[in-house]
Amino acid sequence: QVQLVESGGGLVQPGGSLRLSCAASGSIFSINVMGWYRQAPGQQRELVATITSGGIGRTNYADSVKGRFTISRDNDNAKNMVYLEMNSLRPEDTAVYYCNAKATLSAYWGQGTQVTVSA
């Protein structure tokens, strides 16, 4: 089992920035990929960004966030963190953001953190 806890959401004005954090615990050795997804009201959950757990950490982004969002990880000193740096935020980025961890046979989700972009 893997437990994921997100933090860092909130209210921000258009053009502003936020940094989301996800702390992973439990059977973290089984994780192959970690990522962020989001779900806006009335819409399906969608991929935002992913990063592989091993090696150099290969990243992948949704077209809508490329150049504005950056996913990163910190596995040093027993930390198991994944971050999402969000810049130039737009009202359409408003959603609940979920941390996700994919293992070989399972996928895990955090409880979500609300991001609201509004003037």
Image: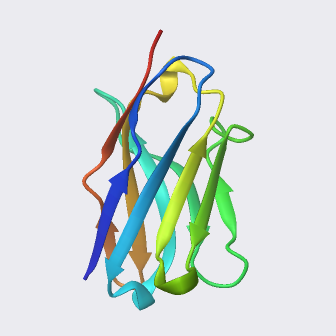
Residue 17 in the image, given as x and y percentages of width and height:
58, 32
In the rendered view, how is the structure colored?
rainbow
Which of 52/80 is in front? 80
Image quarter for residue 105?
Answer: bottom left
Q: Is residue 18 above or below residue 101?
A: above
Q: Is residue 97 toward the left or the right of residue 89 in the image?
A: left
Who's the residue at 50% across and 29% down the image? 93
116 up-or-down from 1: above or below = above
Residue 19 or 44: which is nearer the viewer? 19
Q: Residue furthest top?
A: 119
Judge from the rendering whether residue 90 lies leftward or rightward of residue 105; answer left or right. Answer: right
Residue 4 drawn at (x, y percent): 32, 66
User: x%, y% of residue 91?
Assistant: 50, 18
Q: Tell me if 91 is positioned left or right of 4 in this view.
A: right
Question: Could you say which quadrant of the image residue 64 lies in?
Answer: top right
What residue is drawn where x is 33% and y is 78%? Answer: 25
Horizontally, is 67 left or right of 14 in the view?
Answer: right
Number of marks in the rendered image: 0
Q: Is residue 15 above or below residue 86?
A: above
Residue drawn at the location 56% of the way across and 17% of the way down: 14
Give the x, y percent position of residue 85.
60, 46
**Quarter occupied by the N terminus:** bottom left
Residue at position x 37%, y 72% in the image: 24
Residue found at the far front of this picture: 77
* Between 57 and 18, the one nearer to me in the picture: 18
Answer above or below: position of 64 versus 16: below
